[in-house]
Each structure stands twice: as C-alpha cells, then as structure tokens.
Amino acid sequence: MNIFDLSGRVAVITGGNGGIGLGIAQALAGQGCNVSIWGRNADKNKAAAASMAGLSGKVDSRVCDVSDPASVDAAMKATLDTFGRVDGCFANAGIGGGGRRAFIERTEEEWRTMFATNLDGVFHAFQAAARHMTDRANAGDPFGRLVATSSLASIFGTARNEHYAATKAAINALVRALGVELARHGVTANAILPGWIKSDMTAGLMANDKFVANVMPRIPMRRFGEASDFGGIAVYLMSKASSYHTADTFVIDGGYTAF
C-alpha cells in the first residue's frame, strides 16, 4: 500500500495559481488528491487548473479574496458542494516585503495591508477549514491538515521588511497553537518555510552579478528551491504518515541571507 496515495482526499490551496502554491497543487493532484485552487485572479486560477489536466486528482478553482471572511466562506461552501469534504487547507496566499523603506517611515496603510493579506488570510482560511474538519471529527471522521507557508524572515528577521516578518512570525505562532488545540480532532497544523524559491519574483536575480557574488554563497544548498520541493512535503503532510507530525516547521533548502 502506498501511504502517500491521497485518492479521495480534498485539499484547498489559497494562492495556488503560481510559485509554491502551484507546486503543491501539482504534487497533491499527482497523488490522487482533489484540489480546489482559491485566488483573486479568475484567469490565473483557471490556467493553473487546466495545466493539471490528466493528473489522477480532479482540480478546480474558485475566485476568493482570503482577506474577506465572506469570500472565504463562499469559496468553502462551493468547494464542499463540489467535493463533499475538505481534508487539507494550504494557506499560501500573501504578499512580500512591499518596499525597502525603514520602519520609522512606514505608513499605517502599509502595515494594515500587510497584515490583512498575510495574517488575516491564513486566519480566515484556517478557521473555515477547521470548522468543517471538527464537525466531521465529531461525526466520527477525524482527519484534517492545516499547512501555512511562512518565511525565514520570521526566524532571522529582516531589515526594512519588518512588517512582513511580523506577519510571518504570527503565522508560525498560530500554527503552534492550533497544533495543540486541534489535536483531539485528528487535525494537524504545520508550517513550510521557503528559502530562495524559483519564481517570477526571483527570475532576474541570477542575472545580477552583485547578487550572485554576495548572496548565493550564503545559501546553504547553493541553489534556489524548486516548487516541487514544497510539493513533496505537502504530499507527506496530507498523508496518514504525518498523523503525529504537528506544530512543526519544515525548512526548504535553508536558503537565507544576512542583511
């Protein structure tokens, strides 16, 4: 028996139409998991779902603003109407540092926007998923997986992106707390911390001689992580093999740099 066979399982992936989220979606669908991609951009969602045609799991998409609880509730209802259950929620939606200005120059709007997109998005998606999972557990079907993508900034800090680091540190704390609170329902909570990941955002870095000379030597694996790296961990976390692996953080490649 393949312990990573996820046939019949259903996972929601917020921000699943690119980068890390797309890698997670592809890996899960390849193991027979049905996947619902939630994102703000309908065209990107549909394109991501279409790119996975032919995999053993069914993939669909929902337009969803994870910073809006009503939008999340509507997406959850539509996903349950389609698949009948949700076994995992991978909260990947968010935004990056948002500029390189000093802390004392930050505006209230910048601070609130960062929290709404990064932290509130995880809260709303996790809460909707956890309500469904605990209801199912009370009906005799205890299984659920909550996974957030965080950032190494939450551990090592960051200069001029401190509001971003604050949201990611809060996500890590939320994961640890949920690991304790939801264990009796058979629900686990974990975080994945990427190092340097290949994406549209990092595509131009390797063309920068200064970056290659100063930053690449500080990346322990000397390479960018691949989206498939995250997918492999996602498959493990959705499987029965991870039933007792909760409130932990998985560091991909360890790729970080000093500021």
Image (cartoon, helix red, strand yellow):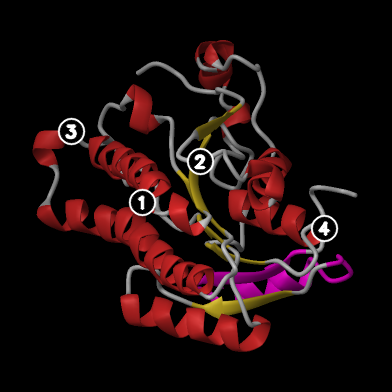
Say which residue appears at 81% left-offset and 63% top-offset.
32
**Residue type pointed to by label 4:** Gly
Tell me which numbered mark, 1 or 2, is placed earlier along the sequence: 1
Mark 3 or 1, closer to the camera: 1
* Element assignment for label 3: loop
Q: Which residue is mark 1?
A: 181
Is residue 40 found inside the magenta-colored segment of the image?
yes
Distance in Å between CA atoms under marks 1 and 2:
11 Å
Q: Position of residue 142 (x, y in %)?
A: 56, 63
Q: Amino acid at mark 2?
A: Thr
| Residue underneath mark 4 | 30
**Alpha-carbon span between mark 3 and mark 1:** 37 Å
Position of residue 212 relative to residue 38, above or below, is above
| Residue in the image at 31% along x and 26% along y | 157
| Magenta range | 33-56
| On screen, residue 25 above or below 224 | below
Total numbered badges shown on the rendered structure = 4
- Cα–Cα span, label 4 and label 3: 43 Å
76, above or below 164, in the image: below
Which numbered disc flags the more N-terminal residue, 3 or 1? Answer: 3
The numbered dot on residue 102 is 3
Q: Nearer the viewer, mark 2 or mark 4?
A: 2
Comparing marks 1 and 4, which lies closer to the viewer?
1
- Secondary structure beneath disc 1? helix
What residue sits 31% from the left and 27% below the top?
Answer: 158
Q: Secondary structure at mark 2?
A: loop
Q: CA distance from mark 2 to mark 4?
A: 24 Å
From where the camera sits, is residue 1 visible?
yes
- Identify the residue position indicated by label 2 in the image: 246
